[in-house]
Image (cartoon, grey):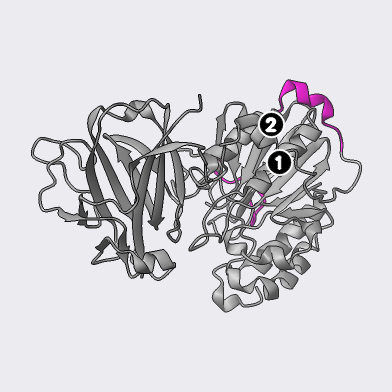
Amino acid sequence: MATRSTRKFDRMPEVLLRLADWVNKNQIDLVVITGDALENPGHAREAWPELVSLLGKMKTPFFNVPGNHDFGLEQVMPFSYGGPDFWFSYAGFIFAGFQTYTSRFSGMVELADRKSLEGLASVASDYPEQPVIVLTHAPLYSGPVIPTWAPPANAAQIRQVMQRCGNVFLALSGHIHVLTSGEEKGISYVTAPGLVETPDFSFLLWSVYPDRLEAVALSGVSFEPVPHSQKILVKIPERLRKSVKAPTEKPETKNWPESKELLTKWFGPEWSEYPGGTPIIWKKERLLLPKGSQDWFFIEQAADPLPDASGKNWYEPNYQAKQWRQGSLPAVFGYRRNKAAREVIGTKLETSGSSYWRKTFNVEAIPSGQRLMLRVASDKCAVIYLNGQLVDEERLFHWADYWNRYVVVPVSLLNPGENTLAVKLVNTTSSHGYLDIELTEEIPEK
């Protein structure tokens, strides 16, 4: 658009003008964009005027949920067109849109904030008899066609909130530019194709009926159904159908209502929108493995170590760690992020890539408590096993902090006597790497 030399969507103006003409001729009621209206996130300010001038040729209202390529668009796009968090009511439906990416960490990653999930819960509870449609950029469901990198890191938490709302029945997304559909626990998940990138320049046309929604993929060139694409059918839950009606007024975006702190009420005080990322404080605890612990064995390499001669995997007890070196935590590579990392180095890593760590420690007796706390400081992130059982697998990339992860682990995974902790420090080729771990036991109050 405004800086077209940086864009791969060179045909966007042409496609959008053609779409606007078709929308007006066919009296389409509503247009929703599930992100990536732009290509280069650095040019939102100069691209927005051209984008709104093209979309503004439609006589119907349109709303946009910013995607990862729209980073910064929410700062220049008026709230009346959507944004990071908004909702509106239309034809008896509640549309709730929220952003699924963040730059809180060392790069943009897909993650929905707790504020957004609290807002969704509040809106849904305020209108319990109206069917709710969630709008996000990243797909919230891991279907067979959806790449593993596409859903937000906390997609499971988002789905948990939507299911608990009780009236969310459909989630519309984009991001992967491929038409997919799936269903889980009464909620349908649909990703739209890409209007300006796929060979057919296609989009979804939704038709509303008293008991269902139907969608068909149309070509943005011919406006005919895309060959070999299947019609999507989404049933409206029977108890919510009475709210569906013909549209009578123009929808207007609204802010989330005042939070009711429903997530804590629904899931308890330890629930977190960021899996493993919220500090959990126990009044009394006993240290089983301190931070900065010694007598670890490690190896630096890109791929998982091969099984040993007996067939044991690198993360299992009794694995023969031949050619592994001995070291201590914290493990550091080129780290200058915080004072603690500069002053304390247990092992200086030779590369910034991935590394694998194993430590055997003894527990004289199974603790009397019911839970363990695994705390992790990592850059970029870590995968952790206790006695061969996976207890944490993080996908977010970030700087190391004490602590990035707070993971509650059942005491039943501990053995009396010898135990094995195995860690994969996941890292890209960058200028930093870091790992430290602490393991404690909760002491229940009497």
Q: Are marks 2 and 1 in contact (CB under 8 Å)?
A: yes
- Which residue is farthest front? 446
Say which of 26 and 259 sits in front.
Answer: 259
Q: Is residue 232 visible?
A: no
* Magenta residue check for 364: no
Residue at x 82%, y 31% (from the top left corner): 244
* Magenta residue check for 236: yes
- Locate residue 326, reporting x and y percent: 17, 54
Which span of residues is magenta-colored?
219-246
Which circle marks residue 165 in the picture? 2
Helix, strand or loop under label 2: helix
- Locate residue 224, reporting x and y percent: 65, 48
Residue type indicated by callout 2: Cys
Q: Relative to 352, say whether 121 is above or below.
A: above
- Which residue is farthest left? 309
The CA span between labels 2 and 1 is: 8 Å
- Locate residue 107, reporting x and y percent: 49, 63
Residue at x 37%, y 37% (from the top left corner): 391
Considering the image in quadrants, where does the N terminus appear?
Answer: bottom right
Residue at x 78%, y 29% (from the top left corner): 128
Q: Quadrant of residue 353?
A: bottom left
Q: Is residue 337 visible?
A: yes
Residue type indicated by callout 1: Leu
Provide the residue designation for mark 1: 120
Q: Quadrant of residue 211?
A: top right
- Which residue is farthest right? 248
Predominant secondary structure in magenta?
loop
Helix, strand or loop under label 1: helix
- Locate residue 317, reporting x and y percent: 20, 35
Q: Is residue 161 left or right of residue 119?
A: left
Say which of 247 and 95 sits in front.
Answer: 95
Q: Is residue 151 left or right of residue 118?
A: left
